[in-house]
Image: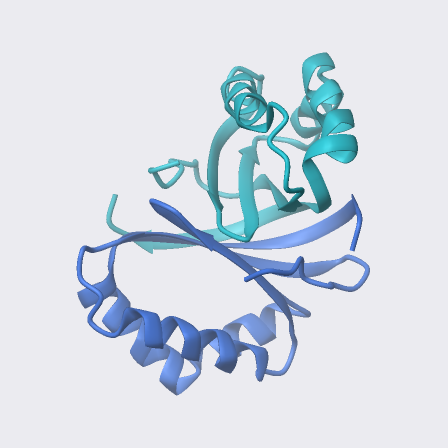
Chain colours: A blue, B cyan
Amino acid sequence: MTRIANTPEPPYYAVIFTSLRTAEDNGYGLMAERMTELAAQQPGFLGMESAREALGVTVSYWDSLEAIQRWKQQVEHREAQRLGRSEWYAAYRVRVARVERDYGFGE
Amino acid sequence: MTRIANTPEPPYYAVIFTSLRTAEDNGYGLMAERMTELAAQQPGFLGMESAREALGVTVSYWDSLEAIQRWKQQVEHREAQRLGRSEWYAAYRVRVARVERDYGFGE
């Protein structure tokens, strides 16, 4: 991703997804692209920021906890989660957080 | 960074720092290493996760808003923030969030 997410005034919600990959690709790249595209179509989606080195850090932003819950339960995303645990990730952590304030410069 | 942060049970706080670099290094690499080392020495620091591609995404975890405020005001860190705006970053955004729940697998 090459842009800082253009999120609204807080409060809103963030899902911080941190992961360590396995050695195999097994369709990971395609899945990651598809999930990025699919997340952006969900109701309540506000933006996403992502980078990967040894560790992958992806933060997606949402307008409510309900929107996050719906995205977690989305059928194609559930299948990606299942394959994530069996194929693509050696470990991951998901943190759901409420953004209280933000500031910055540029963009 | 190569590890998922070993954070305690929520609630705790996250600072999501997303940035776009300028083309120049000008000491950026050394500063980034030093800030990682220095953050880890602050009272209330719980962990950090970071990756950079076109976008840099760094999440640091803290036990309180007061700990985040102290870190923001730390003298050497303030100088890094100043140089960040003048030299190293084309744009950045800082989001302060309260982590409400987390889950994962592995590690």
Q: Quadrant of residue A17?
A: bottom left
Is residue B38 visible in the rendered image? The answer is yes
Residue at point 56%, 22% (across, down): B39
Residue at point 68%, 20% (across, down): B77
- Residue A86 relative to residue A80: left or right: left
Residue B47: percent from left, percent from top: 47, 31
**Vertical comparison of B37 with B22: above or below:** above
Pick whichever, A105 or B25, lies toward us.
B25
Q: Quadrant of residue A67?
A: bottom right
Is residue A60 visible in the rendered image? The answer is no
**Vertical comparison of B78 with A12: above or below:** above
Quarter of the figure with the C terminus of chain A: bottom right
Quarter of the figure with the N terminus of chain A: bottom right
Residue A47: percent from left, percent from top: 63, 67
- Residue B30 relative to residue B84: left or right: left
Residue A85: percent from left, percent from top: 24, 64
